[in-house]
Image (cartoon, rainbow, N blue to C red):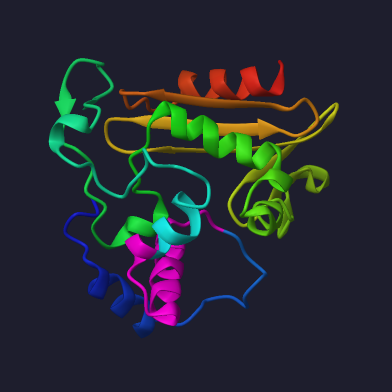
């Protein structure tokens, strides 16, 4: 859905519209907002987004098997529709690359989570700690907390951090629990819809339910 939405169209749309509410008073999950942030960072540093991601995140964390695009089509896992059999083309993020259009190996996903479990051992310690800081609380009793990048839910032993995402043919779930020192990376090449069993199962495993 993003392939025909290049970077200049995305940033142009943002510049032509003003906010509807005072910043910090409303919250919506927004791939668009994160994508605009990526373009803003690239412009401020005068560095292409791919180079910025590689230099500031992938290389410091040792994620050599992660990139914005596959070296060739054969290295992309083939996604499928909800029937689990019909293949779909590889995901093209267009101007939305900063919203999560990376390809990664299972080993790199676990390496990424291990860095979050023990930030002190990472050259990106400051950033890894910063993305745990709550920026918004919502829901009954303000139990649901959002950081810049993670959802944070309470458990009996302390908070757990997680994020999930999907393209038209694949899904992924990443999460970690500092209190138990455990993390979970789950992926599948099938796009579920309503009452998603994949995300619910991954969440329950991490939460210990």
Q: Position of residue 98 (x, y in %)?
A: 39, 58
Q: Quadrant of residue 24?
A: bottom right
Give the camera-side residue of 206 and 20. Answer: 206
Give the camera-side residue of 155 and 48. Answer: 48
Residue 195 visible in the current orientation: no
Residue 90 visible in the current orientation: yes
User: Is the residue 181 above or below the residue 151 in the image?
Assistant: above
Q: Quadrant of the C terminus?
A: top right
Q: Over which residues does the magenta segment extend?
A: 28-51
Q: Residue at x 65, y 41 (%)?
A: 116
Q: Residue at x 62, y 53 (%)?
A: 123
User: Is the residue 32 above or below the residue 180 in the image?
Assistant: below
Residue 172 falls within the magenta-colored stretch: no
Q: Say left or right for 98 vs 28.
A: left
Q: Residue at x 19, y 42 (%)?
A: 71
Q: Tell me the chief SS of the magenta region.
A: helix
Q: Position of residue 43 (x, y in %)?
A: 39, 79
Q: Quadrant of residue 12?
A: bottom left
Residue 38 falls within the magenta-colored stretch: yes
Give the camera-side residue of 17 and 47. Answer: 47
Q: Position of residue 206 (x, y in %)?
A: 65, 23
Q: Residue at x 47, y 21 (%)?
A: 198
């Amino acid at each position: 859905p993003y392939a025909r939405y290049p970077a200049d169209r995305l940033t142009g749309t943002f510049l032509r519209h003003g906010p509807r509410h005072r910043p910090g008073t409303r919250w919506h999950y927004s791939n668009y907002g994160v994508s605009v942030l990526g373009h803003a960072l690239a412009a401020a540093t005068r560095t292409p987004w791919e180079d910025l991601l590689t230099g500031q995140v992938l290389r410091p964390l040792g994620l050599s098997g992660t990139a914005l695009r596959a070296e060739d089509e054969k290295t992309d896992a083939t996604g499928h529709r909800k029937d689990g059999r019909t293949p779909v083309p590889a995901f093209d993020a267009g101007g939305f690359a900063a919203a999560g259009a990376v390809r990664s190996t299972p080993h790199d996903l676990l390496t990424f989570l291990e860095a979050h479990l023990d930030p002190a051992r990472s050259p990106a310690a400051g950033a890894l700690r910063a993305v745990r800081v709550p920026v918004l609380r919502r829901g009954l009793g303000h139990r649901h907390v959002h950081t810049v990048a993670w959802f944070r839910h309470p458990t009996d032993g302390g908070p757990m951090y997680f994020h999930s995402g999907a393209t038209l043919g694949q899904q992924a779930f990443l999460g970690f629990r500092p209190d138990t020192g455990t993390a979970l990376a789950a992926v599948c090449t099938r796009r579920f819809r309503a009452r998603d069993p994949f995300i619910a199962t991954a969440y329950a495993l991490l939460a210990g339910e």
